[in-house]
Amino acid sequence: MIEPAIPSRRKFLQNVGYISVGFSMFGGCIGKTDPAIAARFDYLGDLPRSMNQANQVNAWLEVSADGRVRVFSGKVELGQGIRVAVQMVAAEELDMELDKVTVHLAETDVTPNEGYTAGSGSIKSSAMSVRYAAATARTTLLQLASIKLELPIENLALYNGVIRSTVDKKSVTIQDLLEGAQIETEVKSPVQIKSKEDHKYVGKAIPREDIKKMVLGEQVYIQDLRFPGMVHARVVRPPNYRSELEHLDDSELNHAVPGIIKTVINGNFVGVIAEREYQAVKAARYLEMHSKWTTPEIFPAQEKLYDHIRNIAETPENIRDDGDVRVSLEQGRTLKATYTKPYIKHGSMGPGCAVALYHQGILHVWSNSQGIYPLREALAAMLKMDTEKIHIVSVPGAGCYGHSTPDDAAADACLLALDYPGKHIRVQWSRADEHAWEPYGSAIIADLEASLTESGKIGAWKSDIWTDSHSTRPNKDPGTLLAARYLENPMEMQSRGYRGGGHRNGDPYYAIPNLQLNAYYYDGPLRVTSLRSLGAFANIFAIESFMDELADKAGKDPLEFRLEHLEDQRAIAVIQKVKDLTADQVMAAGTGLGYAFGRYKNNDAYVAIAVKLAVDGTSGQVSIIKMWAAIDVGEVINLDGIKNQTEGGMIQAASWTLNEQVTFDQQKITSTDWSTYPILRFNDIPEVEVAVIDRPHEPVLGGGEAAGPPTGAAIANAIFRACGKRIYDLPVTPGKISS
């Protein structure tokens, strides 16, 4: 059984008799005036963003009575391996063995408030905050030991919780130094960290310990969470977003299904609580059959979706305008193309799940939300409670990247827990509910136009992007929670969320003298939010497909054409690396090798992708043979982690490219299972090779979302090389190739 959450951090400190004290009297960093010491360290300047609200060491780590170190991170585990990366940087800076450092992730009033785990920011923000805090802690501990042992700092060495003299036998443990206190030293810039040449862990490949538990089917996920006396619940969903409950008859429910505890009806929100899980499942089915809802037509015809999007879009917003695009387009050889990406799902292997307990005026919630503090704000607004009365513990989910259904499941569980206090209530969504009610990744249209100069270089480029919102994550607006919209007093969303993600990477990362990017925002028919890489997947698919077509029009090799338009040496390096990786490939008839490049957000990780595939000329079936990636994330923290993230991003993007599309009729979502929404199967996954360019003296860059966007374009470009068919509309179903 997964154990309940630990006590609050404040209570923990009280129970063990800790007294937090500061050590500011010891002044600044060591080694500033001693060249011998300074040579062993690097200096880091600006503090990570997460330290804006938590800039003391004890916000990020504490020393226990046995000398172990517990590290706090406000980020959550989504499958990205943040726990081991945080453990590595803390152990590195404190010179401790890995098993002496534990990591506590995301719990309100215990860990720092780091907002959402999103945007490839966990390493850049959270892990680096822990690095800075651990380095500051080491400095403070050495200063304390210097005073206690009456020795200069240059004669002291810290290792595994003990500070020893290098000239005699004197030593002191860190717990003896602190005497039950914690380190409140403020983290100030510049921070002295270990020299990269002395790293023992950082930059190495450290496997995640939780992988073994997953493979063995042990209890890892929120879906596995169990408490003594826990009861189970299901929510009965309306037929569609705007359905109204006209009638529900539960008068015979207790006779039809044993173990029923309570039916909860609040406006159009219907839930049922039972002693056992299958009883709740049967009760929900019974209520579905004994209820009547309105079923208005709310969606356009699917085949007219993109026309509908263009018709409802707002006046465009100019995002970027360099040079004179109009004149340059008129003067050169021009090419135009339109690319489309449908609504796609997160497709989490584990449908939405949460546990809630209302006890003695406190609402306890266990959730795999990607932002426990923002979720607490949304729940407080929906339930009209003080945030201090809501306690949320992060539990890993059977991962997906982006805002899917964990927050909605938590809202369901909280509503039911308040109606039935004193018991842990577990809400589990069905696969059909997950597929039909999760917020999707937006459909996107990209109209591209470019001109070539006489020398065959791009003279002008114009991107017009049609996009819905790319984040309606929970915040202080209760309408960001699905259940809030169906209560007797419904709470609709007050804004469309973060729409700027739709034009992410919409302007190419190439040196183009005349460049324009316009965004056409629309309020679409389907529920949407953030999904891995936001608009970057669609936009880089379009840009990198278009780059191949422009290269052909210019009569140039597609990779050399890209290199001609790049000034950033790190971008050039990943392209050259992937070119080298594929130099020995021999192409048979019906096979193709395609390439693509992207720098995520145009300011984050660099990645180049190559895909080798085969196309069946009769059926149009595409079979991917192998994929390669070269990625540069600056300083590598965990080599194993960044390779895993890159491989996973490529495989997920291959599934999006070849298979995935939300389908609907005018009344409902019709892709409600894995047959109607197929994803890449295990036997379809190709060999994947990842080369990581480590730059230990460069800042850390986020790599979790970088590999997906170029993968779709590399597949499309490989299809063209294999059979001569240009791909403009995703997904690449066989009929689009064979027609």
Image (tube, rainbow, N blue to C red):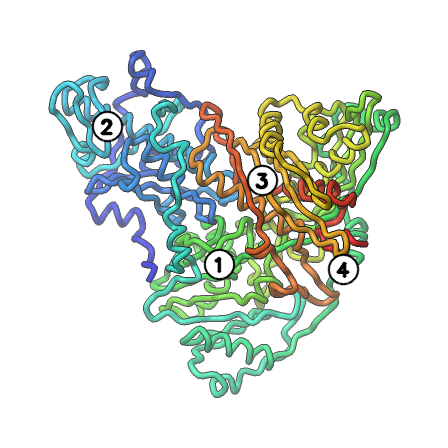
Coordinates of residue 258 in the picture (x, y in percent) = 44, 83
Q: Earlier in the sequence, mark 3 or mark 2?
A: 2
Coordinates of residue 99 in the picture (x, y in percent) = 28, 42
- Residue annotated with mark 3: 707
Q: Can you tell which mark lies on residue 384?
A: 1
Q: Can you tell which mark lies on residue 302?
A: 4
Above or below for 477 versus 409: above
Q: Can you tell which mark lies on residue 158?
A: 2
Q: Amino acid at mark 2?
A: Leu
- Label 2: which secondary element: strand
Q: Amino acid at mark 1?
A: Lys
Comparing labels 3 and 4, the label whose residue is closer to the camera:
3
Mark 2–mark 1 distance (CA, rounded to whole Å): 50 Å
Comparing labels 1 and 3, the label whose residue is closer to the camera:
3
Q: Crowdedness of circle 4 by 10 Å Cα count: few (<14), some, many (20+)?
A: some
Q: Earlier in the sequence, mark 1 or mark 3?
A: 1
Determine if residue 523 is in view: no
Label pair 1/4, CB-CB below 8 angstroms: no
Mark 1–mark 3 distance (CA, rounded to whole Å): 42 Å
Residue at x-position 16% and y-position 22%: 165
Q: Earlier in the sequence, mark 3 or mark 4?
A: 4
Residue at x-position 73% and y-position 46%: 590
